[in-house]
Amino acid sequence: MEKPLDNSRRHFLKLSGTSLLLIPATFIAAPSTQAQIKAQKDKVNYQDTPKDGKKCVDCQLFEPPNACLVVEGDISPEGWCSLFVLKQGNPVSN
């Protein structure tokens, strides 16, 4: 009578181990499938021209050729917004 119980336990442990391996894969894949919400241009004072020598092409958040990680729509490399973060190693001319 011990044998069927042992098989059930062994089967359960195998399934549990397999499930535990799949859980991290689910969490790793999840962020890429979620919609990304970006800020509206008017909310971050976006403009198509530089401000005080600062421009999008020098920003950490800029994605060439014309996008931003956090602002929606087409972004000019010569533009600027209030979320500007200078890339390391890029001096800003005044």
Image (cartoon, grey):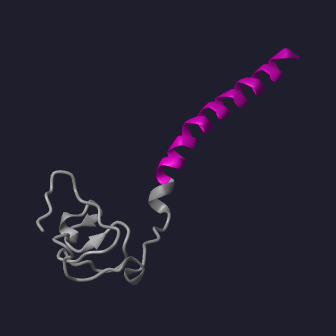
In which quarter of the view is residue 21 placed?
top right
Q: Quadrant of the C terminus?
A: bottom left
Residue shown at 76%/25% (left/top)? 9
Percent x, y of residue 73: 33, 80
Nearer to me, 32 or 57: 57
Percent x, y of residue 51: 21, 76
Percent x, y of residue 35: 48, 68
Residue shown at 62%/38% (left/top)? 19
In which quarter of the view is residue 43 placed?
bottom left
Region in magenta: 1-29
- Residue lying at the far top of the rendered structure: 2
In which quarter of the view is residue 48 placed?
bottom left
Viewed as shown, does residue 13 lie left or right of 74?
A: right
> In the image, is residue 45 above or below residue 70?
below
> In the image, is residue 23 above or below residue 4?
below
Viewed as shown, does residue 69 lie left or right of 88?
A: right
Percent x, y of residue 68: 31, 69
